[in-house]
Amino acid sequence: RVVAWIAAVVICLLASVAFHVQTPTARRDIAGVISRETTAVLAGELDIPDFDSLDLFGGTTRNVVIRDAQGREVIRGDRVRAGIDVSAFLRGELRLTSIEIDGGFIRLYTDPDGSPSLANAFGPPADAPPDDDEGGGLRIALEQILVRDVDVRGDIVDFHDLHIEDFDGHLVILVDPEDGLDLRVHRGTGNVTGPFPYPVRLEGAYALLDDTHTHVALRASRSRDGAPDEHVFGHLVVHGLDRDGPAEFDLRVRVDPVSTDTLAGADLDFVPVV
């Protein structure tokens, strides 16, 4: 009887919560709480204006914005669907079981120290106090971010004015008060329209960025009328991001085949030497 009574109370509480989150005021308030609590532990800012729909398992919203520490918009999602792990949030961890972003943009800015502001936006705030013995701070685990038809622009490494249209990919963002940031990109595809003077198809990209190094691998191709398609395989590793002084670069590129006009249009520092 006691077990049955407890089960009945829990069901009633869940039903009450599920009913109340359907009201516009409750959806706005919850969006505000998530935005404030997340922004409080980030160098950047999360802005969720409202939820179109919301229940115990997640919600849908529009025009979600993430800003970097300088207040610049680095991510905007036109339409966003997210699944929320409520039990993890009660333990002090923001864990979303899935995020789907349809439309919007990603902007790649470079901070004065040479690091990408997009990654730094998910780091701890500059005025964050040292962690106490109990390991305070909100842990963020965004392990299943699916983006579709997103416009990507900005600078990365030596590529300035990069522009990727219709970018699709799988992103992972992990933030831990002790371990720092872990940002990953899997299966990135899209149409590269800049900075090259010719269109390039990004067929697959992988990237890993944490507090110590950056690792990028990609596969791309260029179609040419009356000539074989050109395929490019690139692999870049940057070490020493956590140390003073210059970082260490390891760049490997394989092209098969490649034309001289493709090299010239790439506008890389080593091309005039070649």
Image: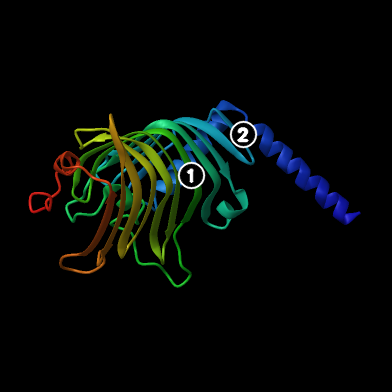
Residue 89 located left or right of residue 56 = left
Residue on which the image places disc 1: 145
118 relative to 168, above or below: below
Question: Tag count in the figure?
Answer: 2
Q: How far across and how far down the image is residue 208, in percent?
A: 37, 57
Q: Amino acid at mark 1?
A: Ile
Whether residue 119 appears in this view of the structure is yes
The disc, 2 or 1, on the residue closer to the chain's N-terminal end is: 2
Query: Which of the pair 147/262 is nearer the observer?
Result: 262
Residue 119 located left or right of residue 59 = left
Q: What whole-number distance in Å separates the C-alpha atoms at marks 2 and 1? A: 24 Å
Q: How far across and how far down the image is residue 108, in percent?
A: 27, 43
User: Which residue is the extreme one toward the right?
Assistant: 1
64 relative to 95, above or below: above
Residue 247 located left or right of residue 235 = left
Residue 229 - label: none
Dot 2: element: loop
Residue 169 located left or right of residue 98 = left
Whether residue 50 appears in this view of the structure is no
Give the image quarter of residue 239.
bottom left
Residue on which the image places disc 2: 21
In the rendered view of the protein, which quadrant contains the N terminus?
Answer: bottom right
